[in-house]
Image (cartoon, rainbow, N blue to C red):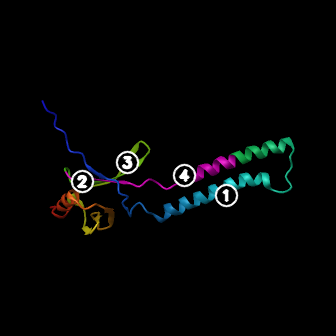
Amino acid sequence: MSAVTEPAPIALGLSPHITREVDGGVLLIRNAQRISGAALIFASVGLWLFPGTSWEPDLALMKLLVSLALGFAGIAFLQEGRTSTVPEIELDLTREEVRVIRRAGRDARMVVCYAFSELGPVEDHGETIRLCDPDGALLVDMPVPVGDVRDQLLAKLLNRA
């Protein structure tokens, strides 16, 4: 008996540019988190450097607790303000699907999945291929190296029903 295996999808992790994921509000919030995190860390250090501070044990303990809380909050804000990972594009020539997948650690979340027949305009720009969603908005602009894979992909994308 021989096992029939399904061909694996072609996964191109070539840093695509997905226009949907770039949102001005998200960028504004990330930058505000970074600035707030840095300000909290500077404030935790500034508590000890501020002139005229008292070194009484009660006040020193209170300043230590407040500065630790500010420092941890600042680090948490800086960690949350990190940029997200670049999504992966899976082009499944067997099923004729385009999948956009975002990975976060061990978790993988499918952002969007379109059949080749559902896609909008497909544009070949030399070394890059632009795929549009059914509404005509740019979905992905990805580099695909010249070769057999590119030829097969373009043949399937341009000759779809």
- Measure the alpha-carbon separation of dots 2 and 3: 16 Å
Instruction: Name the side, left or right, on which 87 lies relative to 117.
Output: right
Q: Which of 81 and 142 is in front in this view?
A: 142
Q: At 59% from the left edge and 49% from the top edge, which residue is drawn?
A: 76
The local crowd at label 4, few if under 14, some if 14 to 19, many if 20 or more residues have their Cα within 10 Å, is some
Q: At 41% from the left edge and 55% from the top edge, which residue is drawn?
A: 86
The local crowd at label 2, few if under 14, some if 14 to 19, many if 20 or more residues have their Cα within 10 Å, is some
Q: Earlier in the sequence, mark 1 or mark 3?
A: 1
The three-letter code of the residue at mark 2 reads Glu
List the residue tagged with mark 4: 80
List the residue tagged with mark 1: 39
List the residue tagged with mark 2: 97
Q: Are marks 3 and 4 in contact (CB under 8 Å)?
A: no
Magenta part of the chain:
69-93
Q: In which quarter of the image is residue 123?
A: bottom left
Element type where label 1 sits in the image = helix
Is 145 colored magenta in this rendering?
no
Element type where label 3 sits in the image = strand
Quarter of the image with the N terminus in it: top left
Is 80 colored magenta in this rendering?
yes
Residue 63 pos. (x, y %):
78, 46
The local crowd at label 3, few if under 14, some if 14 to 19, many if 20 or more residues have their Cα within 10 Å, is few
List the residue tagged with mark 3: 109
